[in-house]
Amino acid sequence: MSGVLTGVRVAAFTHFAAGPLAAQFLGDLGADVVKIEAPWRDLNRYCIRDPEKLSGISPYFLATNRNQRCLVVDMKQAAGLAVVRRLVERADVLLENHRPGAMARLGLGYAQVKGFNPDIVYASNSAYGQDGPGRDDPGQDLLLQARTGIASLTGRGDGPPVPVGAYVIDAYASLLVVIGVLSALRHRDATGEGQWIQADMMAATMHLMAQEASYAMNLGVPPVRSRAGIAHVDQPAPYGVYQTADGYVVMSLGDVASVTRVGEALGVLEELRPYLTERGLRANRDEVAAAIATGVRRLSTAELTTRMAYTGVWVAPIRTLLDALQDPVVIHQQLIKQLSSPYGAQYRVVGNPLKLSGTPIDTFRPAPAAGEHSVAVLRELGYTATEIEGLLAEKAVVQWAGGGER
């Protein structure tokens, strides 16, 4: 496999989601990513799993650790830590998403690594930053959705806050790390200088809400959720979810003229007439949405879609996730990849969505078994067969017992 990052070695001290996602993206781009895992395992291998399917490995782990090799090493042993240090000495990039200070306690903080690998590109992804308030607080996607207020923006105004149903903060923070690593590698190519990249989930979430935050700060208007289900705190009606006679749809942006046509199409124009101004659609969005909802409930999803075609307001049925995976666009773009797990099971994942014309991205290595590449990495680091046997015997390094490497 070759890619734009072929020849770049990444030492990935990553776990859970945000770190592995960043490492996986670098691997997708062709980097040789070595995942350093403790003998007591990455918790994500076994969380949210079915013990009888996929060989008992979590689909979440399989989805976020492809295109990486795995070295299992006990860094609490001096011999194990020496192995890791030798790997880091030869790495171009060190990627970690542990709590601030954890890597430094192992002698692998940025200042320490820079001392023996001066041009290292060192990337840290934390919850709340490397210093200051919150530095040692626990950080996880749901906790960040609460702390940053993103959960407070979602849901009906007469109900509780609703967290987003996907790990959007992990994903967004991981992409910021990837952007930082690529930028730092470009800088190093030009100057020979490495640097420390810092991203954190709190800052990433605030950046994710940049539009909403700007509206609140500059207009002095606190975000208020709609009681009628408008899907965004700043949008006027009819932007939101509506129940049809046989399902649910969303309606997107609409101006006064298009909402007038919606009222005509649904037979609720008289109910809407008092609010048909730009200010009215915003200030009375719950009343507008309620009137529209009355008309929508009388129609099937297909009938509604037909009637709405001329109005200028976009309408789309709400699908299930499994239905969406069968979308013609998903199939055409070949987003779903089937892989052979080293544990023996076949599984499917969503592949990398980025397309590069000159260096296409491919899934060439499934998520690794724990310690699947331990011996290969030791050989590459210059350890002799006798030394490797000793490290395995001492359990300073752990080898997968399941078969060959990929």
Image (tube, rainbow, N blue to C red):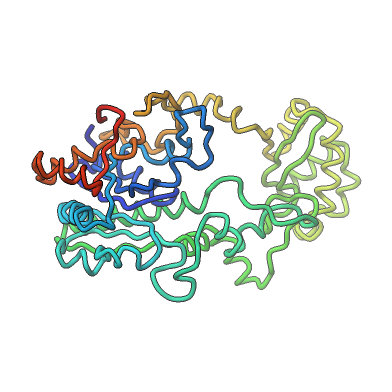
Q: Position of residue 373 (x, y in %)?
A: 24, 37
User: Could you say which quadrant of the image residue 389 lies in?
Assistant: top left
81 left or right of 334 in image: left
253 left or right of 355 in image: right
Along the line of sight, the residue nearer the viewer: 138 or 264: 138
Q: Residue at x 24, y 56 (%)?
A: 77
Along the line of sight, the residue nearer the viewer: 93 or 266: 93
Q: Position of residue 168 (x, y in %)?
A: 52, 50
Which residue is outermost to the front?
Answer: 393
Q: Position of residue 394 (x, y in %)?
A: 22, 47
Q: Residue at x 71, y 41 (%)?
A: 251
Along the line of sight, the residue nearer the viewer: 197 or 238: 197
Q: Residue at x 76, y 49 (%)?
A: 229
Tell me: residue 202, above or below residue 294.
below
Q: Residue at x 9, y 45 (%)?
A: 382
Quadrant including the N terminus: top left
Quadrant including the C terminus: top left
Tell me: residue 301, above or below residue 91.
above
